[in-house]
Image (cartoon, rainbow, N blue to C red):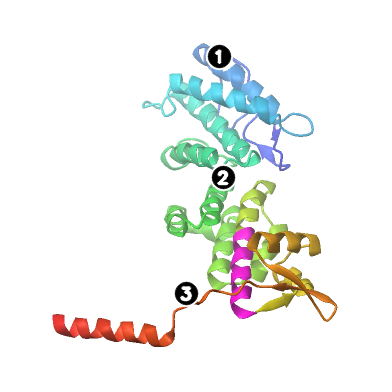
Amino acid sequence: MQVKCSDGMVAPTGQIQTGKPLGGPGVTTIGSNSKLLGELYNKLVENWNAKGSPNLRECERLLDEGKVLLTAHAFLPISYDESSKQVLLIARDILEIGALWSVSMKDIPSFERYMAQLKSYYMDYSQLTESTYKYQLLGLNLLCLLSQNRVSEFHTELELLPPTEVKGNVYIRHPVSMEQYLMEGNYNKLFMTKGNVPAASYAFFVDILLETGRQEIALCMEKAYESIDITEAVSMLFLKGVPEVSEFASRRGWKVEMRNGRKIFKFIEKKDQDLVLADELACTAIDYARELEKIV
């Protein structure tokens, strides 16, 4: 049985029954010792695939119980036989649903914890059949790092991935492209990616990233202009209309004024102490040079 996620895609593996084939790839039968784990997994899949949308509250309860059961079975068995392979596949599927559940709940710390555990299954257990959700979740992890401006960690994680996947996998290319647009300051292309995400689950981190980009644009506007027409601000900030830009302006402390019958945003003037005078900066640099000469 396939499981539909809230983003309309198929969720990790299907329903399982004790003594019968599992829904996930590469799983055969489940032993009697894993009966409770199998029953919990069935319930988790059923609630994640609930009609209309996942039952997130019930999924949370089942995920908490699942982590306790998996601890009893050991998340990462030392031996690798058929029974441990079954447990590994079930554990991986539960963690994948947990990661997607975290995104649905907009819980970044929870998502990071699930991903920290999942990476062991993705990187260290090549004997397992590859999950169809591997690169979707690894791409989500990259986007999560990028949305928090953890660029060095972003590149570290990227280096662990095969070059062919970095270039050809749509789930990986998306965060890589967004990082490139950010580094270039190409905010137009950055905001265009909002309507072209590889999975609906990406929207949460994309929205965070776009808000970061919008704040950078606002900062540039404050440096470049004394004031700006409200309609131009809507366009420059990639907002939908006057109500949205008015709320955004209020958060940044912009003042609304009337000029020639049109509304404008008046940016708050910077205090003198916030500015560094050119001659003062030059004097400081000269002093540093003199001190260096003394050392030499």
Q: Can residue 45 be seen at all in this image of the molecule?
A: no
Give the amino acid at mark 2.
Leu
Q: CA distance from mark 2 to mark 1?
A: 28 Å
- Please tell me which residue lies in front, 197 or 113: 113
**Tag nearer the camera, 2 or 1:** 2
- Please tell me which residue lies in front, 262 or 26: 262
Query: Percent from the top left, x then y, of residue 209?
Result: 60, 58
- Please tell me which residue lies in front, 60 or 218: 218
Query: Percent from the top left, x then y, of residue 131?
Result: 56, 39
Q: Which residue is mark 3?
A: 273
Indicate which disc, 2 or 1, sits on the residue closer to the N terminus. 1
Q: Which residue is mark 1?
A: 35
Q: Which residue is mark 2?
A: 137
Instruction: Mark 2: give few (<14), some (14-19) or many (20+) Cα within 10 Å.
Output: many
Q: Give the residue drawn at x 18%, y 85%.
A: 293
Residue 141 vs residue 105: left or right?
Answer: left
The mark total stands at: 3
